[in-house]
Amino acid sequence: MGNPLQTLNDFWQLTVDVWQTGVFGIDIGRLITAVGIFAVFLVFRRLFTRFFLSFLKKLAQRTDTDVDDRAIEALQNPIRFIPIVIGTFFVIEYLQPSGTLAIISGYFIRSLIAYTFFWTLYRLADPFSQYLKKLERYFTVAMVEWLIKTIKVLFIFIGVATILQIWGIEVGPILAGMGLFGVAVALGAQDLFKNLIAGILIIAEKRFNNGDWILVDGIVEGTVESIGFRSTLVRRFDKAPVFVPNTKLSDSAVTNFSDMTHRRIYWKIGVEYRTTVDQLRTIRDGIEAYVMADDAFVGPPEAVMFVRIDSFSDSSIDIMLYCFTRTTNWGEWLEIKESLAYAIKEIVEGAGSAFAFPSQSLYIESSPDDSPVLFIPPDKGQSK
C-alpha cells in the first residue's frame, strides 16, 4: 500500500476531474446552477401568472363585451407556459453548449416558442369564434361550427409544419408522401369519406340544426347535439347519446319536428250503434263548435279542420276529428289534448249517447214448430 496522503490526493484529483467534466462537457457546478436558475423561473411563473392574469381580468371587466373575458380564460395555460420558455432560454444561454448540443438547443428553444405561439392561436379560436357566428344569417349553425373546427385544425397543421421546418425537415416531401399514402388509405376508408360528404350535404341542405328534434324511422328519435365530420350525436329522450353515421341521416327520410308550424290531432271517436241520427249531429256539431271556439286550435283557412261521421266499424259508429294546434311544444300540446278529451266526453254523454267498445254478438236461432218430438221410452212398470 502506498502513501495514504498520496492516495487521498489522487482521489481528490479524480473527484475534481469528474466535477469539471460533468455531462456533455459542462461541469456539474454549472449544471446545478442551471437547475437553480430554472427553479427560480418556476417560482416566478406562479407569481407572474397570478398577478398578470389578475391585471388582465381587471382590464377585461371594464369593457362591455365578454370576448376579452373568454379570451383571458382561454389563455391561462399558454400564459403559464411562457415563464418556462423564458427559463429554458436563460438556462441555455448560461450553459453555452457547443457543437451539436448548441444546434439542438437552438432548435429546441425555437420549437418551444413556435409551440407557445400556435397554442395561443388555437386557444383564441373559441372565444373569437362568436364573430364568425354573425355568418349564421347566411349559413347554418353547423356550417359555422365546422368552419371554426377547420380553423383550429389549420392552426395545428401550420404549427406542426413550422416546428418540422425548424428542425430542418422539409414539409413538401412529407405532404407528397402523405398524398400517396392517402390514396391507399382512401381505398380502405371509403365509409369515412362517405360520412364526411354526407355530413356536408346535411349541412348544405339544412336538414336540421343543433337543438332540433328529429325522427329517423328505425334509427333514432331525439335532439341533435352536434353534427360531426363522421357522425351526428343525437340525444334520445331518455338522455342516452346515439352516434349516428351521417350516411344514415343523409340517405333516410328525416322528420324534423322542430320545423313544425302546427301540431296535429287525429282521432277516431267511436260511439254506440244505438246512437240516433239527431244524437250524431249533436255530437259532431258540439265537437266542431268547441274546436272552432278555442284559440289553441288553428282553423280554416290557415289549416284544415274536419269533424265528420267517418265510418261504420264492427262495434261503433266512428267520428273523425282532424285538427291542428297552434303550439308545437309537446307539453302544451298534451295539455290541449287532455282538455279536448274532457270536452268530447261531456259532449257525447250530454247528447245521451255513450262510447263504444269492442264486442261481439252471438245470435241463437230457435227450433221450428214442426220439429220432431223427443221420444221418451215408457217405464217397465207402466201398464199397457
Image: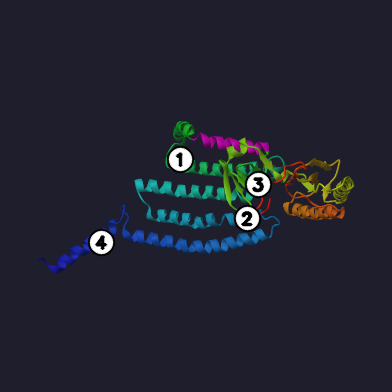
Residue 74 visible from this viewpoint:
yes
Q: At label 3, which amino acid type do we have?
A: Asn
Name the foreground residue: 336 vs 369: 369
Q: Position of residue 310 (x, y in %)?
A: 81, 41
- Counting residues from the N terminus, which is met first, the one under dot 2 or under dot 4? 4
**Picture quarter with the N terminus:** bottom left
Residue farthest to the bottom, as pictured: 4
Is 359 within the magenta? no
Q: Position of residue 283 (x, y in %)?
A: 86, 49
Height in image: 204 above or below 49?
above
Q: At label 2, which amino acid type do we have?
A: Arg
Q: At label 4, which amino acid type do we have?
A: Val
Q: At label 1, which amino acid type do we have?
A: Gln
Height in image: 81 above or below 147?
below
- Counting residues from the N terminus, which is met first, the one under dot 2 or under dot 3? 2
Q: In the image, which residues are magenta?
A: 189-205
